Amino acid sequence: MIDPTDRTTHDAEHDPRNDALLIHVNGALVPKDEAVVSVYDSGFMLGDGMWEGMRLYDGEWAFFDAHMDRLFDSCKAVSLDIGKSRDQIRALLDETAAANGMTGDAHCRLMVTRGRKAKPFQHPSLSRWGPTIVAIVEHSKPAAGLAGGIRLASVPQVRGLPHSQDAKFNSHSKLNCVIACLQAEAAGADEALMLDPHGFVNTTNACNLFVVRRGEVWTSTGDYCMNGVTRANVIALCRENGIPVFEKNFSLYEAYGAEEVFLTGTFGAQTRVASIDGKPVGDGSMPVTERLRTLYKGLVTRTVAAQKAARA
């Protein structure tokens, strides 16, 4: 049975328009119920692919260049030729949003895999017909219930070493994070707080994590965490606005004692954490987080305006 109090950092308000979406699949806009890829696709078969999550504000994909930097760097690192330029990717995203009547309050999941394989085996050379490119763009607003905060549980599943599977890849291979999420659910929490290989606090299964202690903002060193665009923006905002911020090792002991804890991600921006391992975080007030939310909204507004001006 589903617990009605369960929530995730990606809970969105129900929007019936999403029942009739058009989805971009390899150059065609396809009705949602007909949007499929081959069972021989390397992404389906092996998790061999990369993805990006982006939000649409006033007709602009916020921080588009940063997302493309991450996507192209990741694909280059695994010798996956996207076969499209950044401008061509932008065009297919715009076409998909326009076909669904979207100018804002929309979230995209762009997926690029190594493509269809000749045989159902691992070797990358068996993907012989070029990449599979899919863009799902949904009408999407974070659910109101997220204001109450996310319950985290620390779990045994860790973020691994870079030479095992570098967490900086936004790869389709998410089993590590899925296992962590299952462990958190078994502990009665919403999502998992994952440690690094040395036992220091790292990320959740889905988002980057920040704690606030005595007015200072702490986050992990970045050695084992997702290469988050929102994470980088929050660190930059702290530095630009006189908020002490540190990328450092810290333990669960220090996370338990934090006055505020919040998560960062493209979908939810800054999401409150209500408890860790059943221990309430602070007294419920979030002054530093609220200030960062305000600063982040301003950054989005400025960035979107600059992107519009650059394309005018």
Image (cartoon, grey):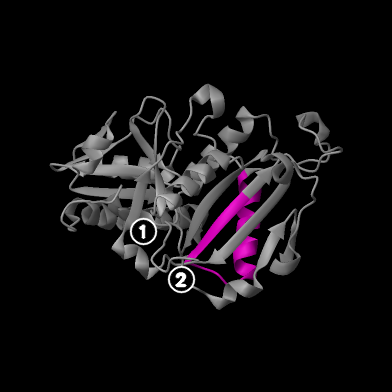
Label 1 belongs to which residue?
301
Element at badge 1?
helix
Label 2 belongs to which residue?
13
Q: Which quadrant would residue 75 be assigned to in this image?
A: top right
Front residue of 20/119: it is: 119
Residue 288 in the image, given as x and y percentages of width and height: 19, 51
Q: Residue at x 34, y 43 (%)?
A: 209
In the depicted structure, whether residue 274 falls above or below residue 194 = below
- What kind of residue is marked 1? Thr
Residue with the most extreme bottom position? 16
Residue with the most extreme top position? 163
Residue 90 among magenta residues: yes
Q: Looking at the image, is mark 1 or mark 2 nearer the viewer?
A: 2
The part of the chain drawn in magenta is 86-110
Residue 303 in the image, given as x and y percentages of width and height: 39, 53
Front residue of 96/216: it is: 216
